[in-house]
Image (cartoon, helix red, strand yellow):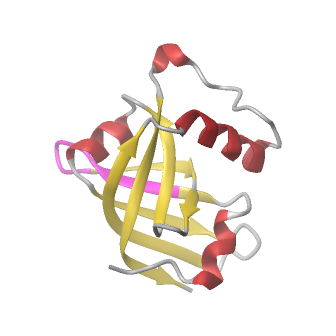
Amino acid sequence: MASIPEAYHDLFEKRTFAHFATMTPEGFPHVTPVWVDYDPDVDRVLVNTAQGRRKERNAARNPKVGVSMVDPDDPYRYCSVTGEVMAMTEDGAEDHIDALAGRYMDLDEYPNYDSDRGPRVIIEVGPREVVTA
């Protein structure tokens, strides 16, 4: 298992957009821009989505995923993670999306939450390979 170098933890503290790659049932990559977070205590990249969305369904079916992000302050500095979904949980997912809304939108609550679309889910990715520059 690889780990996110500490020198790149700052990417998860600012408005860094990431691209989350999953595989469709037909074997094609599905790449989606996402807000991204990191839990250094368990060394997992976190992606928050609504249950039932394509990325959530793909990750549930095939846990091999990728996450790539570019430093918003330096486009030549990046962190790319290839890994495996270690967990998918609704626990704390609403609070997590609100925290992300604070970072990305300067809001206390995520404004687009619609419980009719399904509960929020945190996808936890364990890094297998990490490439940085």
Q: Is residue 74 left or right of residue 56?
A: right
Q: On the rendered image, what quadrant is the C terminus found in?
A: bottom right
How far from the left and from the top, in percent, is residue 27? 18, 50
Outermost residue on the left side: it is: 26
Q: Is residue 20 magenta?
A: yes
- From the viewer's perspective, is residue 79 above or below residue 21? below
The residue sitting at 40% across, 41% down in the picture is: 89
Q: Is residue 77 visible?
A: no
Q: Specify start and end residues of the magenta stretch as a single range.
A: 19-28
Residue 44 falls left or right of residue 69: left
Residue 113 position, x and y percent, is 61, 24
Left or right relative to 85: residue 62:
left
Taking the view exactly as shown, the residue that stands out farthest to the right is 106
| Front one among 123 and 26 | 123
- The quadrant the N terminus occupies is bottom left
Q: Quadrant of residue 26?
A: top left
Near-viewer residue (109 or 29): 109
Instruction: Name which residue lies at 58% across and 57% down.
Output: 37
> In the rendered picture of this protein, how many numbered marks are placed on residues?
0
Q: Where residue 39 sits in the image (x, y, percent)?
A: 54, 62
Q: Residue at x 69, y 32 (%)?
A: 110
Magenta stretch holds residue 21: yes
Inspect this view and state whether residue 129 appears: yes
Residue 120, percent across and down?
A: 49, 32
